[in-house]
Image (tube, rainbow, N blue to C red):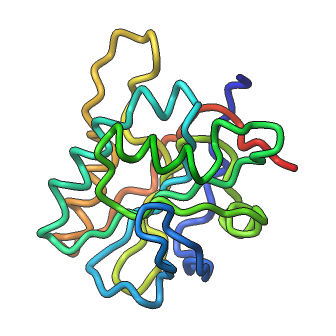
Amino acid sequence: MALTDSNMLPLGTKAPHFNLRDVLTDKQVSLENSSSKGTVIIFMCNHCPYVIHVIKGLVKLSNKYKDDGINFIGINSNDIVKYPDDSPENMKKFAQEYKINFPYCFDETQEVAKAYNAACTPDFYLFDNSLQLVYRGRMDESRPYSQIPVTGIDLSRAIDIMLKGDKIPDLQYPSAGCNIKWK
């Protein structure tokens, strides 16, 4: 496990297109088919202790904002040859165990992670209704063994500000977690 910070894609970046299979429903997921007030993209995986640390809070956030028109999409881009715990079959088990209620997609080619300049798991991106990046960084300051409770305050605050139509402050802190397992 190598602690890695997110790369902080420039604000205003248009969300890169993708069409990935949701391991839970076996349906294709793309941003173009998603009508919403905003979309949270999370690069995540099954075995990362940083993801496991925040997953219950992440599911809680996705439930909180569902009625507000905010979509959440999880994407696993890890190399499953070297990290079989992150296979689509295990993604489905992980999603069921933690009651993930949003699409959890597998990026087999790793092209989506590269397009988003993703670096770690978890890595969070918030796009507005025109698919412009308005927030990227951490969910909150909690980390495994930090004794700081998972609140989701940073991501939640960004979503709330966006929903009000206000500008999210440019000062945003990177997420941190395990590096994406590249092929």
x and y percentages locating residue 168 in the rendered image: 34, 61
Q: Which residue appears farthest toward the left when viewing the image?
A: 67
Q: In screen coordinates, is 157 left or right of 180?
A: left
x and y percentages locating residue 111 in the rendered image: 76, 69
Q: In screen coordinates, is 124 left or right of 68?
A: right
Front residue of 171 and 163: 163
Question: Quick check: 101 above or below 179?
Answer: below
x and y percentages locating residue 93 in the rendered image: 45, 43
Q: Residue at the location (48% across, 72% down)?
A: 26
State how many labels appear: 0
Q: What is the quadrant of the N terminus in the image? A: top right
Q: In screen coordinates, is 45 left or right of 41?
A: right
Q: Which residue appears farthest toward the right when viewing the image?
A: 183
Front residue of 64 and 11: 64
State the image quarter where residue 4 is shown. top right
Q: Residue at the location (55% across, 58% down)?
A: 75
State the image quarter where residue 103 is shown. bottom left
Question: Quick check: 114 above or below 19?
Answer: above
Q: Residue at the location (35% across, 37% down)?
A: 97
Question: Quick check: 99 above or below 140?
Answer: below
Q: Residue at the location (49% across, 67% down)?
A: 22
x and y percentages locating residue 100 in the rendered image: 33, 50
Question: Quick check: 70 above or below 35?
Answer: above
